[in-house]
Image: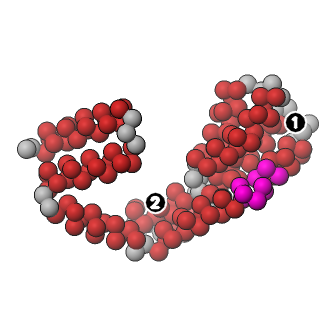
Amino acid sequence: MSPEILGILLLAVLLTSIFLGFPISFTLIICALVFGYIGFGDVVFSLMVMQTMGFMKEETLAAVPLFIFMGYVLERTGLMERLFRGFQMVMGPVRGSLYLAVLVVATIFAMATGIIGAPVAVIGLMATPIMIRSKYDVRLSAGVITAGGCLGILIPPSVMLVVMGPIANVSVVKLMAAA
């Protein structure tokens, strides 16, 4: 089978599987293995193992679980909620203070965890009821929470930079300095 037809078929199966509701991670893994086997034969399995081992040898990637652990500790100890309340009191007289407090706390939490999903979920659960009770616009509130989570991964230290460094063959220290 020609590579062009195989690529188009891979894309069609991938999109169909995702739209049918299969989990994206499993869909990507299974499609890669099946179409890799069709295109390259048995060598795809040894390539997969070698690639996995290569990533496991990267010392900088050891920081990723520590970022996640730090975010988990911040959330479980209640520190993020206290930080949110503190910023809310400090910014009380400012118009839109709740938006600003949510944005700052979501950014700090995203910086601590290094990922977007956890801060958005935690701050969303924490701040959304308060914002609704205070008669803030629901759509704007969701936007502020999401923006805070996205801002956090751009500010060092960031898991995104730690993961991108070895892949791009760039020093993580230089990436952090550039960010």
Residue 125 visible in this rendered orientation of the protein: yes
Q: Secondary structure at mark 1?
A: loop
Specify whether 162 is left or right of 139.
left
Q: Residue at x 70, y 26 (%)?
A: 138
Q: Amino acid at mark 2?
A: Met
Q: Position of residue 162 (x, y in %)?
A: 51, 63
Give the magenta part as a residue range: 74-82
Location of residue 31 with respect to 164 vertically, above or below:
above
Which residue is disc 2 drawn over? 164
Toward the viewer: 67 or 31?
31
Task: Tell whether position 114 is magenta.
Answer: no
Q: Is residue 131 above or below residue 38?
A: above
Taking the image as shown, residue 62 lies to the left or right of residue 96, namely left
Q: Residues within 10 Å of mark 2 (few under 14, many from 20)?
A: some
Q: Is residue 23 left or right of residue 10?
A: right
Q: Magenta-highlighted stretch: main secondary structure?
A: helix
Question: In the figure, residue 53 lies in which quadrant?
Answer: bottom left
Q: Was residue 80 drawn as part of the magenta stretch in this picture? A: yes
SS at circle 2: helix
Circle number at residue 94 = 1
Where is residue 102 drawn, in percent x and y?
75, 42
Q: Is residue 88 left or right of residue 55?
A: right
Identity, as a three-letter code, of the amino acid under mark 1? Val
